[in-house]
Amino acid sequence: MADQISLTFPDGASREYPAGVTAGEVAASISNSLAKKAISARVDGAHWDLAWPIDRDGAIDIKTMSDDAEALELIRHDAAHIMARAVQELWPDVKVTIGPVIENGWYYDFDRSEPFTPEDLGAIEKRMKEIIAARDEVRTEVWDRARAISHYEQNGEPYKVELIEAIPGDQPIRMYWHGPWQDLCRGPHFQHTGQVPADAFKLMRVSGAYWRGDSTRQQLQRIYGVAFRNRQDLKDHLTFLEEAEKRDHRRLGREMHLFHFQEEAPGQIFWHPNGWKIYTTLQDYMRRRQTEGGYVEVNTPQVVDRKLWEASGHWANYQEHMFIVEVEEEHAREKRINALKPMNCPCHVQVFNQGLKSYRDLPLRMAEFGSCNRYEPSGALHGLMRVRGFTQDDAHIFCTEEQIEEECAKFIELLASVYRDLGFERFDIKLSTRPEKRVGSEESWDRVEAALENAIKQTGNAYEIDPGEGAFYGPKLDFKLTDAIGREWQLGTFQVDPNLPERLDAEYIGQDGAKHRPYMLHRAILGSFERFIGILIENYAGRLPFWLMPRQVVVATIVSDADDYAHEVVARLRKAGLRAEADVRNEKINYKVREHSVGKVPVILAVGQREVAEGSVNLRRLGEKQTQTLPLDVAVTELAAESVPPDLCR
RNA sequence: GCCGCAGUAGCUCAGUGGUAGAGCGCACCCUUGGUAAGGGUGAGGUCGGGAGUUCAAUCCUCCCCUGCGGCACCA
C-alpha cells in the first residue's frame, strides 16, 4: 500500500493525503466549517462513514445535511439503531435482528415473546428522544469474524450470529456503537446520536414479519418508523398519508355507492348499480378495442371437471388456490369432482382444439372476459385489489414462433393506447428472461427472448430486463403503471407459453401438411376489471373521466314548480346517451349542490322558474364555483359530446 | 396462512357487569328556498356468531367468522 494517496474532489481538484486518512479528516483539511457540517462522504460512489479510513486513490465528495439522499439515509439508519437500543434498554431480553432503511423511514425486527402495544411505541419513542438528546458518540470498529460470532453467541443473539455467517468472507465484519449500545452494521452512520432530528420521526405501527422473509421460520415483531430532516417534512408526509387514505377505493366505493363486501362471501364483490355502470362501461370499451385489434371473443365454463385441471397441470401445482366443487352425494347422480376455473387458458385450448386448425387460422386471438375464482390466502384479501372472484380481460393468442414478435408489438401498441385512454401516460416494461429451472432448448429461448425484446424496441418503449424471472416455460413481459400519486401497479402481462399447448395437445396443420404445435401467448391489459377499477378510483380520487362516471348529470330543482321540467330534461339527456337523474327532493339548492358535490357528480344542472320559462339549464361543474346558463339543446349536445368514450371520438 | 389490532343504528363513532347513545343519513310535517348542510317530529340495534363465568354479559374468559395494518403468498 502506498504511503500517500490522491483524492479527487467534485470540482476536479485533487490533493494528497496519507493512506488511511479518514473522510472526516479530509473534510477538516478543507475547512473548519465543512468539518462541522460534514455527515458522510461518497468515496468512488460508495456511501462512506466519516470515520472510515481511505487507503486508495479515488474520488471523494463530502456530504452535509443539505444532501438529500445521504442525509435521509443516515437519519433513518441511525434512527433504526437508536430505536433498537431503546427497545433493548426497555426490555433487555429482546433479541435484535435487522433494521434496514426503507422508503420514508425504517423498520427493525425484534424477537420478543410479548407483543409490542401502542403504549410501548410511545415509551420507545420517548426513550429514543432521550438517546438523541444525550448526543452519544457513534463509533465503529472492524472485528474478526470469529470474535464477532463468539461475542453474539455469548450475548444470546442468535440472529446476529446467523447474519455474520451469511456475510461473504471477503467483506469486513463491522460493529457500531451508539453510546453504550452495540450492533452489527455495514454503516455508514452519523457521528453522534444528536444528529437525528428529534422532532421529525414517528413510530408508525408494529406488525409481524418472518425472519429472513421465510414463512417457515420464526415470526418476529417489526416496528415501522418514518423519519425526515425536519418537522415540516414529517408533517407533510403524515398529511400525504391522510390524503392517500381519502382516496382509498374502499372508502370511496362506499361513499359513491359503488360496491360492498360482506362476511358470507369474503373476497367477492357485491357491485351496486353505480359501480356496475363503471364496470360495464369499461368492459364495453375493452370489447371494442379488442374487436378492433382482431380478437374474437369466447366464453367458457366456470365449473370444470378435475380431469382438465390434471391435464393442464393446475391440479398438481395450483390446487391449494382452487375452489373445489362437489355435488352433495345424496343428490349426485354422477361421481365428479369439479373446480371453479382459476384461469381461462385451459378452456381456451379446448375451444382451439375443436376442429382442425390450419396455419391459415393463425394467429388466432381468442379473448374472454373470463370470470375466475381463486382461493387466495385470507391475509392477502384487500378491497378490489385482491379478491377471490374476478374477471380478467384475458386473451390467448395461438400462433407460430415467427409470429410472436409481431403479435407482441401489436399487443404493446394496444396496451399503450388503452392506458392512455384511461388517463395513464406513464408505464414501465419489464422483460423477464429464462430462469434456472426451465424447459425447452437454449436456441428456442434465444429466439423467443429476442422476439420480445425486438417487439419492445419496435414500439419505441423503454424496458428493463429482469434476469431469471421468467416462467419455467417461457419469457414474459410485465407492464407497470404509475398513478397520480406516484404509486406503481403491475397490470398488463404478456407471456410466451409453448408448454400448455403441449400438455393439452393443441395443434395445427402447417403449410407442409404436417401437424405442428402452436405457441400460446397469455396476455392481459387491465389484469382484472375489479382491480383496475380500484386503481382508477384511487388514481382519480373518485373523479373518474366523464365517460366512465356512473352518474354524469344530476338535474336539481330549485323550486317544486320545476319538477316536471326537470324530468323532461333528464329524459332528453338519457335519450342523448347520458346517465342522468333528477333530484326533485324538498331540499334547498344549496343542500343538493353540496350533496352531489360530495358524491362527485361531474355536472349539476340546476333548474328553477327562470330555466323553466326560457327552456334552459344552469350548468355547474364539479369543483367549479362558476355556473353557466345555456339553452337545453346546447347543454345536451355539449354533454353528449363529452361523454363519448375516447376510442369513439378518434 | 402467520403476528397484532378491531367488530355497537345505513355511515362515522361514544358508552356501561343491571338488555344502549350522538352526529350524519332515512321517513313524515313545516318551509318553495338561486349554487357546498333551513326547521321540527319520528322510526331504526339479538351490541359479528357460539360457548363459558355470573343472580345478571354488549362489557369478563375461550373458540370461530369477518375486517384493518404488516409479513408470507400472487405457479
Image (cartoon, coloured by chain):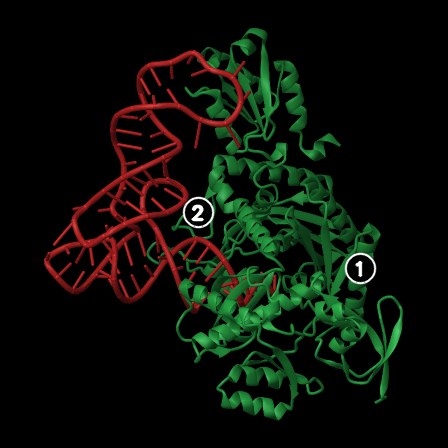
Chain colours: A green, B red
Residue A434: x and y in percent read 73, 69
> Which of the image's four quarters has the C terminus of chain A?
top right
Q: Nearer the viewer, residue A565 or A133?
A: A133
Judge the density around disc 2: few (<14), some (14-19), many (≥20) Cα neighbours within 10 Å: some
Check the residue under mark 1 and report the chain it is in.
Answer: A
Mark 1 neighbour density, 10 Å: few (under 14) some (14–19) many (20 or more): some
Q: Residue A404, how many percent across, how many down?
A: 77, 56
Quarter of the image holding residue A536?
A: top right
Say if residue A88 shows up in the picture: yes
Query: Is residue A586 left or right of B49 when viewed as pictured?
Result: right
Residue situated furthest top in the rendering: A613
Task: Give the image location of residue A114, x and y in percent.
Answer: 39, 73
Tags 1 and 2 touching, CB below 8 Å: no
- Which label sits on residue A261? 2
The quarter of the picture where residue A32 lies is: bottom right
Please tell me which residue is depicted at 61% across the width and 41% down the height of the picture: A540
Labels 1, 2: one chain: yes
Is the residue A585 above or below the residue A27 in the image?
Answer: above
Q: In what quadrant of the picture does the N terminus of chain A appear?
A: bottom right
The type of residue carrying mark 2 is: Phe
Q: Is residue A26 left or right of residue A602?
A: right
- Label 2 element class: loop
Q: CA distance from mark 1 to mark 2?
A: 42 Å
Q: Which residue is mark 1?
A: A453
